Image (cartoon, coloured by chain):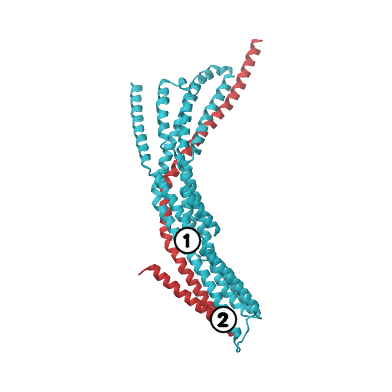
Amino acid sequence: MNVNNTMSELQGEITALKSEASRLRTEAGLKGLNDQEDHFRDLWDELDDLEYKLFQQQFIANNEKLQKLVDEVARATANGEAVNQSLGKIKKAISGLRTKLQGAGKYLDDAKALSDKLDELARLVSGS
Amino acid sequence: MQKVIRITSVLTQLAHSWPAASAIGARKKANRVATGIKEGGRIRALSPCGRSFALFAIPLLALLLQGCDPTIYKKPLTDFRDANQSMRDAYFLQLAVNDKARVENSLIQAKGSFWMKANPTLKQIESYSAEVAKARQKKAVEDEQTIALRHLAFKTIGTYASILLSLASNDSTDAISAEVNGLVGDASKIIEHAKTIQKIHHLSEEAAAWLGPMSNMVTALVQVGEIVSGFVRNRAIRQTIMIADQPIHELIVILRSEAVLARQKAIESYAGSEQELRNKIESFEENNKRKDRLLTVPVSSFHEAAACLQQVDATRQELEEAESIGSVFDAALKSQASLVRKAAMPSYEDWVKQIEDFRDRANAVKISLQAISAG
């Protein structure tokens, strides 16, 4: 059994039924049969829901396959992402080294201040 | 739908615009490396071992680089990423058209009933309002999980392109090079600073003595790093494209079939609405001709129905005449196929073999040197 043909046949039947429900609704309306009109309105609405459930089903039928493919692509790109991350880590590591080196510069400032103090003390002690 | 036509046109152009001069970047890089070696007698500042390395290894790597410059993928990948964006927009735009088609079809039912009533009661007005409100809530595909999965599918294709594009860009390598150069610069500043401190002056002079050659070596190493990074990135791009090809292709094919199905459904829906309106107008006319009629359909209703018919007819024609949405997806498929062809270029394999040979030789040299230094 061809699923596409079955879908198409079902769709054709629903369309014909919707058209008939609409015609009957108009006829009931023109005759002032309000209850009948409401009945055919509800019937048309149910058929419309059925039609779009059939349409939606053709998307839902792909869900499992799509999810599987999405997972496959994610796995396939994992290595490339890892390379990108590695390059990022290298940059971060060198940045860290630079930060530490810049921190060392601050200690040199303190060392220079201390050195200047010692020189000054030495001059005082020697009386020069 | 004009957007779809524009997208299709752009995508078709993109699918045929492969960068013929993509090796320009590689040549520039090779020249930069060569210039870096010759500049300012830097080679003289290197040790004999470093000099040999710089003289032979760097030009060799630079030559190899011309065959594996990842930036050659930048343009086609940018095209592919943009194509995916257009494809995503077209897909959800099509679903929005389907929503509109369904709402329109349901509204015609509500309006058709209301047009018959010359003097509607309050109850009939309320019933009409409720029917209109319900019609406006309708969607062609209501299942949220199904819609979310389509968003995820396009996002996944987008991520695939973004990762590859990131690998094809020199941004990360340039950032590393900048950091390494900055590191040497920072060290120089600190040594200059240390020179001003009398107590450690002699130490700073010793440090400065090795900083000069080191900075020259760093220049060479940065260039080697760029070349190695290029090779690693190129290999990652190639592997990712080859492994992801099948699922990417299948994803696009499925999404294409859904978009085509949706387009067909929207056309059928508008054609159905058109037929409904014609039937209603015909019924109203027949009713008004009957002498035993219970009610008379007002003239204003005929005008409203005619205007509605004109609008529905125009929309259906517009949909039918618009470029097929399938072509947007076909362009994306072509674009992906071109990426695969590029990644599987036979000349590329030659480069890979040469690089592997180079790696083996470099290892052999390293082992020999280790043996010498230990002896």
The picture places residue B113, in percent across and down from the top left corner, at 59, 78
The residue labelled by disc 1 is B259
- The N terminus of chain B lies in quadrant: bottom right
Q: Nearer the viewer, mark 1 or mark 2?
A: 2
Dot 1 falls on a residue whose secondary structure is: helix
Which residue is located at x 52 percent, y 20 percent? B208
Q: Colour of chain B?
A: cyan
Residue at the spot 49% in from the left edge and 40% down from the top edge? B169
Circle number at residue B357: none
What color was chain A assigned in the picture?
Answer: red
From the viewer's perspective, is residue B302 above or below residue A105?
below
Q: Chain of mark 1?
A: B
- According to the image, label 2 marks what residue? B283
Pick whichever of labels 1 and 2 is earlier in the sequence: 1
The answer to whether residue B169 is visible is yes
Q: Is residue B208 above or below residue B124?
A: above
**Label 2: which secondary element:** helix
Q: Nearer the viewer, residue B344 or B175?
A: B344
Q: Quadrant of residue B114?
A: bottom right
Circles 1 and 2: CB distance less than 8 Å? no
Quarter of the view holding residue B26: top left
